[in-house]
Amino acid sequence: MNKKRILVTGGAGFVGSHLCERLVKEGQTVICLDNYFTGRKENINHLREYHNFETIRHDVTEPIRLEVDQIYNLACPASPVHYQYNAIKTVKTSVMGAINMLGLAKRVGARILQASTSEVYGDPHEHPQREEYWGHVNPIGERSCYDEGKRVAETLFFDYHRQNKVDIRVIRIFNTYGPRMMPDDGRVVSNFIVQALRGEDITIYGDGSQTRSFCYVDDLVEGMIRMMNQDSFIGPVNLGNPGEFTIKELAEKVIAATGTKSGIIYKPLPSDDPKQRRPDITKAKTHLGWEPGIALDDGLRSTIDYFRKSLGV
Ligand code: NAD
Ligand code: UDP
């Protein structure tokens, strides 16, 4: 009776494929929409045997007509290497993608959830980051295509809500990791694990004193589904693990967990790289009864297992 038709844009990507899997296994009818820029068919091939799963190759910068009850809007490259590869396209994906998906939600009366990011806080002057903080973002730097694109997307979500009564939900995702990250994705967890497993030097950018808070993907997906399926709170809400680690500590954990002989080398820090990041998750706890349950050491172990198998090392 409560089964829904659910569109997941960016469904063949890292987070999207875990979300599709969870929804399909709940028995929902899931449409995975992706242009396969950073997504992979291997991420979702195992779902094709389910009658309640289908895929559409489509670019969210173009409008599309579908009949759905819920939309999770995840389409957007998330790793700095990939979103800077074609910066203009990244802005178009965030902004035109939001307009097209909000237009679709408005037409069919669907609830729509935006996968926003901790990057809307930029290189934050407030720590930990609360949802009320407006951020410290460079509008013209190398990260701006992603940060400002996501900020405009949030603006569009709230304007469609105020002006057109679209039923929105906005989550701000903090660094998330787990199986199905691409080995050449460029993000720190996948880079360090792949380097360690291959016995290559581990590349720390800067002196490694910058911090991040790492959330295991299963915890994130649980938070996303809770946010979508409650009626009283539209967000924005931080979803992330409040455990904060320096990048040097992360490198040491990966070295210990893999037992690698890899050394550490230091490379220049990319411009505008945030110095610290940690979510205040009071709102997620209060409104969703959500907090992450998977500690970094445990999540790293299963991610390392995944990469061992997929790389054959
Ligand atoms: P990902 O790169 O693995 O997935 C993004 C997916 O979107 C890919 O499948 C890609 O092919 C697809 N895509 C990109 N441009 C598209 C377009 N124009 N049309 C259709 N599909 C398109 O990244 P991810 O880590 O799975 O991130 C998913 C979402 O979550 C993104 O919106 C990202 O900004 C957000 N997010 C992720 C993190 C994280 O740590 N993983 C943190 C903050 C926010
Ligand atoms: N980083 C690093 N070595 C790498 C990849 C990333 O030291 O091989 C650093 C990066 O400079 C940043 C942090 O790790 O300070 C997280 O980088 P990532 O690209 O994963 O995410 P984001 O910067 O978007 O949080």
Image (cartoon, grey):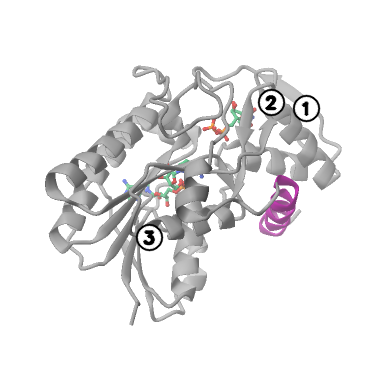
Can residue 13 be seen? no
Q: Looking at the rendering, which quadrant does residue 184 occupy?
A: top right
Which tag, 3 or 2, sits closer to the chain's start? Answer: 2
Q: Report the span colored magenta.
A: 296-311
Q: Nearer the viewer, mark 1 or mark 3?
A: 3
Q: Position of residue 234 (x, y in %)?
A: 33, 49
The stretch drawn in magenta includes residue 304:
yes
Tell me if 112 is positioned left or right of 80 in this view.
left
Q: For residue 264, which numbered disc appears in the image?
A: 1
* Residue at which label 3 appears: 230
What kind of element bears circle 1?
strand
Q: Position of residue 225 (x, y in %)?
A: 44, 60
Residue depicted at x 25% and y 67%:
68
* Residue at which label 2 appears: 204
Disc 3 crowd, CA 10 A, few/some/many (<14, 14-19, 20+)? few
Magenta stretch, main secondary structure, is helix
Which tag, 1 or 3, sits closer to the chain's start? Answer: 3
Q: Position of residue 57 (x, y in %)?
A: 31, 59
Can residue 289 be seen? yes
Q: Report how far apart the C-alphas of labels 2 and 1 lie in the structure.
A: 7 Å
What kind of element bears circle 2?
strand
Question: What amino acid type is highlighted by mark number 3?
Answer: Gln
Residue depicted at x 73% and y 57%:
305
Question: What amino acid type is highlighted by mark number 2?
Answer: Ile
In the figure, 186 relative to 124: above or below? below
Q: Looking at the rendering, which quadrant does residue 155 occupy?
A: top left
Q: Nearer the viewer, mark 3 or mark 2?
A: 3
CB at disc 2 and ligand 2 closer than 8 Å: yes
In the figure, 218 relative to 86: above or below? below
